[in-house]
Image (tube, coloured by chain):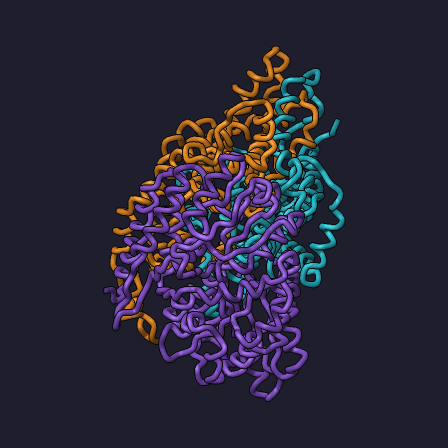
Amino acid sequence: MLAPYGFLAPAAVLFAAFLALPIGYAAYLSLRTVKVSGLGLGKGSRREIWAGLDNYARSLSDPEFLGSVGRVGLYGLIVVPTMLGLALLFALLLDSRRTRGRNFSRVAIFLPYAVPAVISSLLWGFLYLPAVSPFYYVFQHAGWDVPTIMSSRLVVFAVANIAVWGGTGFNMVVIYTALKAIPTELYEAATIDGASELAIAWRIKIPIVMPALIMTFVFSMIATLQVFAEPVTLKPLTNTISSTWTPLMKVYRDAFTRDDLYSAAATSVVIAAATFILSFGFLRLVQNRAFSQEK
Amino acid sequence: MRLHTGTRAATIVAATALLAAACSGGTSSSTTTDAATTAAAANEKVELTFWTWAPNMDKVVEGWNAAHPDIHVTVNKQDGGDPAVTKLLTAIKAGSGAPDIMQAEYQKIPTLVSADALADIKGDIDPGLAKQFPDGVWNAVTLGGDSVYAVPQDSGPMEFYYRTDVFDQLGLTVPTTWAEFADVAAKLHTADPTKYLGTFSAADAGWFTGLAQQAGASWWGIDGNAWSVSINDAATLKVADYWGGLVESGVIDNKPMYTPEWNAALNNGTQVGWLSAVWAPGVLAGNAADTAGKWKMAPMPQWDAAKPSTGNWGGSAVAVTSQSKHAKESAQFITWLNTDQKAVTSLVKEAGIYPANIPAQTEALASPPAFFSNQPDFYTLAGKIAQTAGSFTFGPNVNVAYSAYNDEFGKAAEAKSKAAFTAAVQSMQKITIEDLKTSGFSVK
Amino acid sequence: MTVMTAPPRPSQRATRPVRAGSRAAGRPSATSTLILLLGAAYCLLPVAWVLVASSKSASELFSTFTFAPSTHLVENVTTLSGYRGGLFWRWMANTALYAGVGGLASVLVSGMAGYGLAKFRFAGKKAIFNVLLAGVLVPGVVLAIPQYLLLAKVGLTNTYWAVLLPSIISPYGIYLARIYAAAAVPDDVVEAARTDGAREGRIFRSIAVPMMLPGLVTVFLFQFVAIWNNFMLPYIMLGDDKLFPITVGLSGLLNQGASQPAMYTSVITGALLSVIPLIALFLTLQRYWQVDLAAGAVKA
């Protein structure tokens, strides 16, 4: 039967051309490097040669890279639970008929997802920087001494807040769509029995949307490891975000600022592998629990 | 899109048609080098594309297009600074996609030449052109060799800008030496702790390079067939130590420039001075229009008052890329753009630049920038200051040194410690030289 | 990635009985309303800032209280519209084209792939799905340059195609479409159609697509926004500023280099104008989710 292949063909062709091929190319580049000779100014003074695993060795032993990994770990611990917790909370509230203002809130909460990172940094920059921030204006007039959010100790929260702000709405919509697929009769009985909304949410709704939660968790984790746009756009506003603040920023610096595509490719292969291991490991861990009620 | 076997939903056809319609519009309207080649072969109009970030460049280019019906230049405005270079280097690697003409900051030229991105236009320009530019500037487009890689457009000799109203109010005198600058900074900040005479910006490597240049530094050099790197020379360490001291004592701010906060400080008068370059009036007018008439420009504070000098911050040249199929026409255009009196006058008026071309300067700079109408001799003074600029050689990995500056001085400025400032210079030196060695450059 | 291939939970949607007003389990709750509105306020606050800021003149932006509105909105819109002969509106149109056409094509491709994966058994199914999903693991920043180098080989850089084509494939979209197809299209309905002799393409078009519609709308919305916000790909691919989308265009107004002032007011006004179509789109698409609620049901 050829039909299923027919359905998959457009996706497969586009995937091959615009993802698989570039990925393969990047993997190839990760094993190459450029050697310059002399002053490197004349024509033909640079040659591309095989580098073996040199790029990988350099990437993995770079203290800046290891530092960025630690930072991203902390960042993920802040962002993922906060963002998904809020997304689940809002989705449940949207699903409850006892909540007012649902249509308005749904649009409002989703809206930040539609704001490009170029803009959101500018926007949050105005709210973060004490001299132009309305918050610090209030703090100052109230006589409170509030530390600046972009100081080296707190800057990770500043970045995390932008990610939570931008991502909650997206995850809320995913969970909300899953909630709406639950047939009402599943908890009608419980309602009649006098179970509270909280109990229904906890015992019926959350277990049923567990697959959606796991999916949003995995995708949020992947997005965390790839965090890039928020710190990059905040960077010019502060001394506390270095050009290798996250692993992907290092990739960007190598590829774009240092014009060293080869090291960048090697680091990104490492990031992709780590992402794969983490998401795979997590899924193995939760597999039994999450899908036990499916069969 | 037609690879599916059993299915042929009407929607696919519709979408394909939409795509085709949308995209054919795009491809036909964009000028490709191939199209230009065909046109030239048919002895018709030559089409040139020009990547630049100077504002209103299309208005300047209109003058060329009107006078040259056979060579048409299209302006593609790009982001300023590094990103345009990244894009050009990618196009060079790919073998296609680069424009004919490219604006490039002076410090990027060695990098671009090293990547074989620029054409040598020596044979396509008038040999007398060199005489029309200051030696230091011309040296930057030839890299001290026989080739010519670009025609200089503008330069950015550094100057000191200050708020006359605040200076008068607090009875401060304009500092002429760095020692006086430190005194004034301290007096000002003591008199009003919200006010600063300036900020040390770890985000602006070009700014610090200019300060180091003023002190006599030249970070790269060609020594026979090898590069030398001397970021940690005495001059640079002196500058870092000086600023580290000011930041440590708290009389100079430690926040980056070009942030909303910095703009607010320019507006509300808490940023009382700015060590900037000759293009500063445009930035001040755009960010703090209401402060017009309150600013004045003076020469930089000096290390040695007997031997006045300055550094450069910014400035760029216009080059022909190695992918251009019309190097001759392109060279003709960039010569016109940067030496023709009308073109240069228009560049000053529309893009607010300080032209590098000496013969065209007098007429183009006849009146001061509108924002500095209170200082009628603005350009006379600027001209005198420009002549004191020291020479400075850039190397092939300025990008590495500059990103090291951002990171290392970012840490130092945040730590507010004098020792961290000089340590940052040493790190920059180490990172820059290691990068050259890893890439295989000969290094002394 | 094995779990991802586990069959999604069996469909209840199509067979689901009346889902009328029974969810209205009581009086409005002040607490839940308050929490939700607080969430909305948190999300809207910076957007409200854009609204206020776009009414300020360039110097008011930095000199007056952040949330104090002014009267220069029309003036700012005029300035922005006048920039290089109305280039801003061209960027808006380009963005609509990239996101609209790209989003539609993406929904089609993802919908077909998701349906194929959910409703057929065939050799290599698991492998194909896993490989498609693995595309999520590689960040777009890394892919932009290789994609450029490859598209340059076929002469497509600096054209609309360069941004459109790579935007169509979305592993996430395929994943969602598979979930929705499995949940919304009952096997017996497909079987019945096959018994009636309907061709596979027709079953997909006239039976599966309408059932999957709410899910497809979600996929479209996500992909539309993803393309709308994409910066790196168009940034690398395009040299001609007449082809720029709004993100790349506005970033150019902000990053003019040290010697030029950033055009803050124009960027903020542009940001405001660019969010409006997205709000409109979201409000329009919401209806499809409500259709979902009412599907097979009498809406109270």
Percent across and percent down for residue B192 are 54, 35
Percent across and percent down for residue B193 are 51, 34
Residue extending farthest to the left is B444
Q: Colour of chain A?
A: orange
Percent across and percent down for residue C85 are 70, 63
Judged left or right of residue C279, residue C256 is left
Does B113 appear above or below B79? below
Judged left or right of residue B440, residue B408 is right
Residue at (36, 60) in percent of width and height: B216
Residue at (40, 44) in percent of width and height: B410
Q: Colour of chain B?
A: purple
Using the rendered view, name the quadrant where residue B94 is placed.
bottom left
Residue extending farthest to the top is A194
Residue C69 visible in rendering = yes
Percent across and percent down for residue A88 are 54, 28
Q: Nearer the viewer, residue B22 or A117?
A: A117
Q: Colour of chain C?
A: cyan
